[in-house]
Image: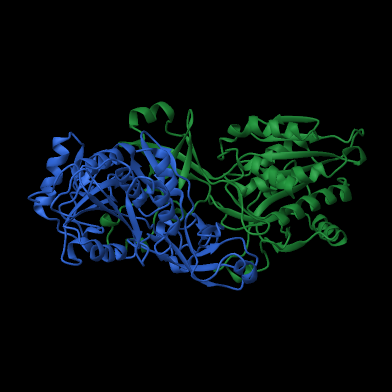
Amino acid sequence: MDIRLLKKYCDILGPSGMEDEVREAIIADIKDSGCEYSVDPAGNLLVFKKGRKRRDKTVLFAAHMDEVGFMVKHIDEDGYLWFGSVGGVDRRVVSGRRVAFCRSGVTGVIASKAIHMQTNEERGKCEPITDMNIDIGAANREEALQSVNVGDCAVFAPDFEPFGEGLVRSKALDDRFGCAVLVDMINGDPEYDTHFAFNTCEEVGCVGASQTVFNTRPDVAVIIESTTAGDVLGTPKTQCACEVGGGAVISFMDGATLYNKKAVAYAVETAEKNGIKWQYKNVIAGGNEARSYQRGAAGAKVIAVSAPARYIHTASDVLHTGDIDAVERLAFALNERSFENV
Amino acid sequence: MDKLYEIIEKLTSVPGVSGFEHAAFAAVREFLASTEIFDEIYTTPVSSICALMRCGKKNAPLVMCDAHLDTVGFLVTEICEGGFLRVAPVGGIAPKILQASVVNIYGKRTITGVFGSKPPHLQAPGEAEKKTEISDLFIDTGTSVERLKEIIRVGTPVGFRGKTEKLLGTRVVGTYLDDRLCAAATIRALMMLDKKQLGCDVAFSFSAREETGNAAATVAFGLEPDMAIVSDVTNAFVPGAHKSREGVKVGNGVDICYSPMTSRRLTDLAVKTAKENGVKYQLSASPGRTGTNTEGISSARGAIPSVLFSIPLKNMHTASEICDLKDVYETARLISLFIKETEAR
């Protein structure tokens, strides 16, 4: 994958419900590929790319466009913004971070009580997100209102960069990397007719996918996602779920989905045949849009091919470019196949 | 104020974790020289930088203007399997601001690190509400231990990363505003003076090791000044702060501080100078030893009469400290006016 494409998508501000700019960027990148595309009323981008052959099954590759963020709930007299999180964000990765507001581009800082002002009892503890505020430098409510209003959204400030040995660090790698994989597939030359979905509102409960499954009625849905890698200091191997640098992650079960056995085997076989580095997710936790495809409409068979990600849903998601390439190669390899007997 | 912002941008781009101030020497000395207002620039044995501005008159008294050069940060205490680091804090840092933050690791070359966070599936219910110590946290370098050991060692300093940028109006966010803001204000103040017209010499002391223990006293001992103007940042009022801090707000001007460490006569005179010249100021009271270099300087060489001017700052000791440029500018004006007013008499 071209790292510049990844950076471009990651740097776009697009929390759940405000994916417009992500979608526009994707459309700009695929519109000359000969694909057909449409945007449904909820903002999901559905794409059909004609291949050289047709297969009996409708196969859909899916990723989500949205990222976690913050929504302003109240602006006080002193110009501080009080907010809630959009999607699941750990309170301990929020305080002190810079954020950027969608549309206006205004910069803010998420603040909580300074160490000098904490009581001994409070020190070392992190207050809930509802007790934090965003400071945009406004002197008062009036000045704040000139740039921001209740309902406006911010995300972690973009600062994509290569990191360590072969890694990348950025906000929103979950799941802009998946979007980039799909864009590469659409711009490729698929063997079979293929459907693609770039969904909205995954982070608030896989809402976009539950709409897309009705509109596309896939027989097989392949979810390209990132998944938590617990391979950090102090975690026993059995609890890692997956490892950064360990290759594409194939899930047999997570917190939301029990994957179809045949489909999982098909993915594993495809990886093996093509010499693609892969690993199982070995902890039953988390979840992704597979649950919506498996349970929506008449139900699809689901496969999740994920990139292992450390510090997911923070300003510093960390992914390995080797894993991203493995996911992309596996996605391409899967799409070379008919999915017969899956 | 544009000039001031330029100076702040310049000074905050230079690292200087307490004890490792020499990392800032070259850039700071070069910058000070480029202002063309100083007659002599030197470094002291405890890593402070001193810049002298001479009026050219014989036996002229000396005013020392102090701001501290060092910043809070961390030291690497252990290099662990998988390319992770354990660190100890240098200065007071709240653990709650660290997870998923980006840091610079100042090894043989500067590399990026990320403070790790625990994956949700490994957390016990209610864990987020519990206390965290910095010793529980780790920094991810994404680099193999073998490679890492070529770049860093135990003891390597680590600093926050966060660019200096403008917020709404005249507010600015940045890393290391504590205390590079005050250095910027002092340099800007000295630029406002015509040294030939002064009846005193001025020494700008950009002192080391404030965050870890007041080394500015050694600079004062060496300089033997007749008086000192110390400037540092102060915690501004923010939501949830104690009632007693309501009087110190970002945007309300330079904070003139009364304390047992400062000269009441000179502080009164500073207030009068501010009033007469329309400098926007606010008063604060620090009934102890101020937690600034004033403590060390005011007791150096017996005693040196000192004043303390502070710039209100939000989110102190984080990568996103916030100030108002207008407050910095008013601080510069007051320092400059006060030097002219007293000429160390």
Q: Is residue B289 visible?
A: no
**In front: A336, or B207?**
A336
Instruction: State the image quarter where residue B311 is shown.
Output: bottom right
Q: Position of residue B202 (x, y in %)?
A: 81, 39
Q: Colour of chain B?
A: green
Is residue B269 visible from the viewing direction of this image?
A: yes
B319 vs B336, left or right, is left
Question: What is the quadrant of residue A270 in the picture?
Answer: top left
Letter of the chain shown blue in the rendering: A
Q: Is residue B240 left or right of residue A203?
A: right
Point 80% across, 42% down: residue: B190
Left or right? Give the position of A52 relative to A167.
left
Residue A16 lies in quadrant = bottom left
| Marker count (numbered) | 0
The x, y position of residue A331, in whole percent, is: 23, 44
Residue at 14 percent across and 43 percent down: it is A268
Query: Which of B10 and A181 lies nearest the eye of the viewer?
Result: A181
The front one of A207 and A342 is A342
Q: Residue furthest top?
A: B150
Please provide percent x and percent y for residue A221: 20, 55
Q: What is the basis of the colouring in this image?
A: by chain
User: Residue B298 placed where, x, y %?
Assistant: 73, 48
Image check: A145 left or right of A228? Answer: right
